[in-house]
Image: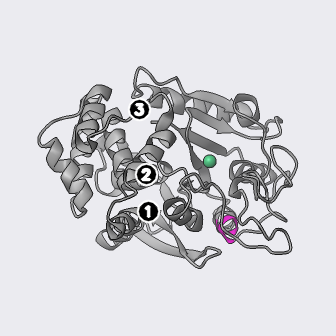
Amino acid sequence: MLEQVSEFVCLGCAFSRDERYTADIERRVNLGNNFHLFRSLQNSLGSVRLTSREDCQNHLSQFFDQKPQNFYSNGITSFTYEMAKMTETSEKNSKKMLRLKPFKRTFIMSARYPDLVQLVHAGFSFEGRQIKYLKISTTNFNNITKPIYFMNAMIHAREWVTTPVTIYSVFRLVENLRSEDRDLLQDVDWIILPIVNPDGYEYSHTDFRLWRRTRSVNLTNSVDCVGVDGNRNFDVSFNTVGVSSNPCSDVYPGPEAFSEPETRIVRDILLEYLDRIQLYLDIHSHGNYVLFGFGNQTVPSNAAQVHHVGAAMGAVIDTMKLPEAGYYLVGNSASVLYGSSGSAQDYGQVREIYSNRFIKYFRVTIAI
Ligand SMILES: [Zn+2]
C-alpha cells in the first residue's frame, strides 16, 4: 500500500539522521521495487540521500505533487490518512498487492532462511484469514535455556506503522545483523507476530481507514456493530477500567474475555512459552511511550525492574529521534497514558507474576 510505503520512507528519514542506518534505508527502498508506486518513488529519489525531515518532506511533496500538511506535528495517523485520501483513485490491484506486502515479506524471509526462520500458522481470524508468526532461532527453539523475546503488532487495525516495525526487526535479525547485535540472535529466540488482527487491517484499507477493532459478528450482542477492542479482550481485570458497554464503542471489550480468535492466539503463544518469555512487546501507535502494567493503576511486583529496563529502552530510542519529537515517556500505563483493563500487556505481566518470575512486559507505543 502506498500509505505504508510512505511510512517506510519516513521511517527511513528518521533513521537516516544517523549515518549508520543509511544502508538500511537504501536496502528497504530496494525491497519495494516490485511495486510500481514504490518504484516511481524510488526513481524520483534517485541517488539522493534523505538526511533530514525537510529532505523527506520535500521529496515526498515533489513525488505526490502535494505538500503533506502538519506532517509530523499531527503524527503518522493523520499523515497516512491524508495519503489514503490522495490514493483513493490509485489502481485497485496495486493497492491490494502493497497492503499484502507484510504477509509476503514474512513468507519470503522464512523461505530464504529455513535454518533460522520458521513460519508458524497459528490459526484463523474471525473472517478466516490465516494468522502467522515467525520463530527465529539459531538452535531451532530447542535450547530451553535461551530466553524468548515475543513481539506482536496490529491488535488495533488502524495502527499501520506498527507492522513495519516488526518486519524491520526480522530484517535486522536475519538479513542485516550487525556484529554488535550478534548476541540478540545467538542468545535469544524470537517470536514475531506482525499482524494480530488481519480482518480489521483489511477493513481499514477497504472501508474505513481509522477502524480499530476486530471484525467479529455477535448478533445476540449487537445487530448494528461488529468487532471488539482486542486490547481490552484479555482475561485480566476484564471489563473494569477504560471500557464501554456500548458494542459500537472503540473500547468495547467484548461479551467475555477471549471472545476473539485473534486474542486467543496471542494468549496461546504467551502460555505455551511462559517459562521462557523474558520480554513481551505489544506495539501500538502513535505516541512516544514505553508503558507497563497495570491499566488499573496498580503496579506489578517487578515494577522497579520493568521501569528501569523501559527507561533504558526509551533512552536508546531517544538518541535517534527527531529534535521535534518528544522524549519517550516511560511508566505505568494508567499513570502515563490512561486507564485500561483486559490488555495484552497486562495479561502477559500478570501471568508471569503468578508464575513468580521477574519478567518484563511492555507496551511500546511509537510515533514517527
Ligand atoms: Zn493501539
Q: Is residue 18 left or right of residue 340?
A: left
| Label 3, label 2: how far apart the Cα atoms are | 14 Å
For disc 2, the marked residue is 84
Asked if disc 3 and disc 1 are in contact, CB closer than 8 Å, the reply is no
Residue 140 in view of the camera: yes
Q: Is residue 180 above or below residue 327?
A: below
Q: Could you tell me the amino acid type at mark 3? A: Gln
Question: Which picture quadrant has residue 19?
Answer: top left
**Span highlighted in magenta in the image:** 261-265
Q: x, y percentage for residue 41?
A: 22, 49
| Label 3, label 1: how far apart the Cα atoms are | 40 Å
Kindly identify the residue that appears in the image at 21 percent across and 46 percent down.
26
Question: Which picture quadrant has residue 88?
Answer: bottom left
Q: x, y percentage for residue 193?
A: 52, 61
Q: Is residue 143 above or below residue 74?
A: below
Q: Could you tell me the amino acid type at mark 2? A: Ala
Mark 3 surroundings: few (<14), some (14-19) or many (≥20) residues within 10 A: few
N-terminal-most mark, 3 or 2: 3
Q: Is residue 150 left or right of residue 265?
A: left
Residue 32 in view of the camera: no
Looking at the image, what colour scheme do you see?
one colour
